[in-house]
Amino acid sequence: GAVVSQHPSWVICKSGTSVKIECRSLDFQATTMFWYRQFPKQSLMLMATSNEGSKATYEQGVEKDKFLINHASLTLSTLTVTSAHPEDSSFYICSARDPSWGQGAEYEQYFGPGTRLTVT
Amino acid sequence: DAKTTQPPSMDCAEGRAANLPCNHSTISGNEYVYWYRQIHSQGPQYIIHGLKNNETNEMASLIITEDRKSSTLILPHATLRDTAVYYCIVRVVQAAGNKLTFGGGTRVLVKP
């Protein structure tokens, strides 16, 4: 299947600093990517939908000024956690939709391996 | 969004079939049933999806009831590597890009 990578796989940063996480689709062009957050022992929560060449669509309750998303190319989306605080410590996962996989509702999403962020 | 209900956890024996149930009684006629799984500290992995008919692939089988209000994911010969959280998701088709909404899932533990 298609491959989605994330970098870094884990990062530790100090409170108040910003952290950038990259999500790449390695063998297909993804016009749409998604960013999720997962706290320990909880399910994935969608944060935002990232569309190439346009502004991201954020889910209710997600601060767009804190979680900056850029989807500058068909294979790369970045999530920047600005002024990170310990409560932002989480597992961040991206996914990318492969438009060649199917039609309409059958579009499959491929997930990255995740990035574990720890804010001290 | 149509919601899904899954048991929070289940154990199964290695080598035996694992049957994972999912209720989606409010599913709409054009919504698909998707199954993903997440092994600890990894991103989710697509397993299978279906609309009305039963489906089978190299990983699993999906049985959807005739009224489409429930489905069962079958892992025919569970291995220890199948230990994971399994998510049953009903697909919402939106212009923004086909979001996947994850519920609590079923934590499956395959025991030797």
Image (spheres, helix red, strand yellow):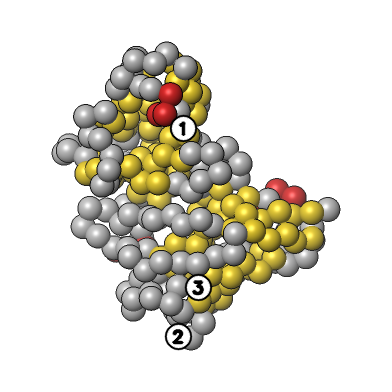
Task: Tell me which corner region of the image, top left, top right, bottom left or bottom right, holds residue B40.
Answer: top right
Q: Tag 1's secondary structure? A: strand
Rounded to the nearest whole Å, what is the CA distance between mark 1 and mark 2?
A: 39 Å
Q: Pointer 2: residues within 10 angstroms few (<14), some, or many (20+)? A: few
Rounded to the nearest whole Å, what is the CA distance between mark 2 and mark 3?
A: 11 Å
Residue under disc 3 on the same chain as residue under disc 1: no
Residue type at mark 3: give it.
Asn
Q: Residue at x 53, y 70 (%)?
A: B22
The furthest residue to the left: A54
Residue type at mark 2: give it.
Asp
Towards the viewer: B88 or A40: A40
Q: Earlier in the sequence, mark 2 or mark 3?
A: 3
Say which of marks 2 and 3 sits in front: 3
Q: Residue at x 35, y 40 (%)?
A: A35
Residue type at mark 1: give it.
Ser
Q: Provide the chain ID for the residue under circle 3.
A: B
| Drawn side of residue B71 relative to residue B81, left or right | left
Which residue matches tag 3? B23
| Drawn side of residue A64 relative to residue A116, left or right | left
Q: Provide the chain ID for the residue under circle 2.
A: B
The x, y position of residue A4, in whole percent, is: 44, 38
Q: Provide the chain ID for the residue under circle 1.
A: A
| Labelled disc at residue B67 | 2
Above or below A45: residue B13:
below
Q: Residue at x 55, y 65 (%)?
A: B6
Task: Tell me which corner region of the image, top left, top right, bottom left or bottom right, holds residue B61.
Answer: bottom right
Callouts 1 and 2 close, C-beta under 8 Å: no
